[in-house]
Amino acid sequence: GRKVSIVLARPHTGRWHQIRQHLASGAIGHAILGDSSHGRSRTNRIWKKKRRMMKERTCLHLCRVRLPEGTEYSPGGIDVKCPLAPDLVKMLKAMPVEFLEKARPILAKEGIEI
């Protein structure tokens, strides 16, 4: 079968599109599941159908945004967290136990609970 990874990316600048593009590039070659622009259409269709996911779903989640203090737009700083959506939690819980056990402590440090 195909291999799946959980990737924790911490971009300091840029947009989420760049994360998608870099992961799908020839250098890494590991597109985000569900990414219709940069991923493999057949793989995405099979993955989503098997897990009853929305056609439009991309398995990408912004879990935290931090903006520094002292800028024009965030004089007091901003730190916003967002828990995983229920469909992503369900998908992750369906992964092999050993896969989740390795990922849980790393994700917990970022405030992501599975």
Image (tube, grey):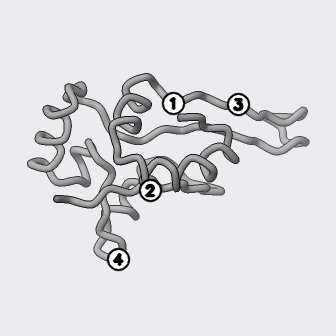
Q: Amino acid at mark 3?
A: Val
Q: CA distance from mark 2 to mark 1?
A: 21 Å
Q: Give coordinates of residue 65: x percent, y percent.
A: 67, 39
Q: Nearer the viewer, mark 4 or mark 1?
A: 1
Residue at the image point whose x is 46% and y is 25% from the top: 85
Q: Is residue 35 left or right of residue 66?
A: left
Task: Say which element carries label 2.
Answer: helix
Along the viewing direction, whichever of 54 and 109 lies nearer the viewer: 109
Task: Say which element carries label 1.
Answer: loop
The answer to which of marks 4 and 1 sits earlier in the sequence is 4
Q: CA distance from mark 2 to mark 4?
A: 14 Å
Residue denoted by label 3: 80
Residue extending furthest toward the left = 42
Residue at the image point whose x is 36% and y is 40% from the top: 59
Q: Give coordinates of residue 70: x percent, y percent.
A: 90, 42
Q: CA distance from mark 3 to mark 2?
A: 21 Å
User: In the rendered view of the protein, which quadrant contains the N terminus?
Assistant: bottom left
The answer to which of marks 2 and 4 sits earlier in the sequence is 2
Q: Amino acid at mark 2?
A: Gln
CB atoms of marks 2 and 1 within 8 Å: no
Residue denoted by label 2: 18
Q: CA distance from mark 3 to mark 4?
A: 32 Å
Task: Say which element carries label 3.
Answer: strand
Q: Nearer the viewer, mark 1 or mark 3?
A: 1
Along the viewing direction, whichever of 78 and 47 lies nearer the viewer: 47
Residue at the image point whose x is 12% and y is 40% from the top: 45
Q: Give coordinates of residue 75: x percent, y percent.
A: 88, 34
Residue denoted by label 4: 27
Residue denoted by label 1: 84
Residue 10, compared with residue 25, is above or below; it is: above
Q: CA distance from mark 1 to mark 3?
A: 13 Å
Q: Amino acid at mark 1?
A: Leu
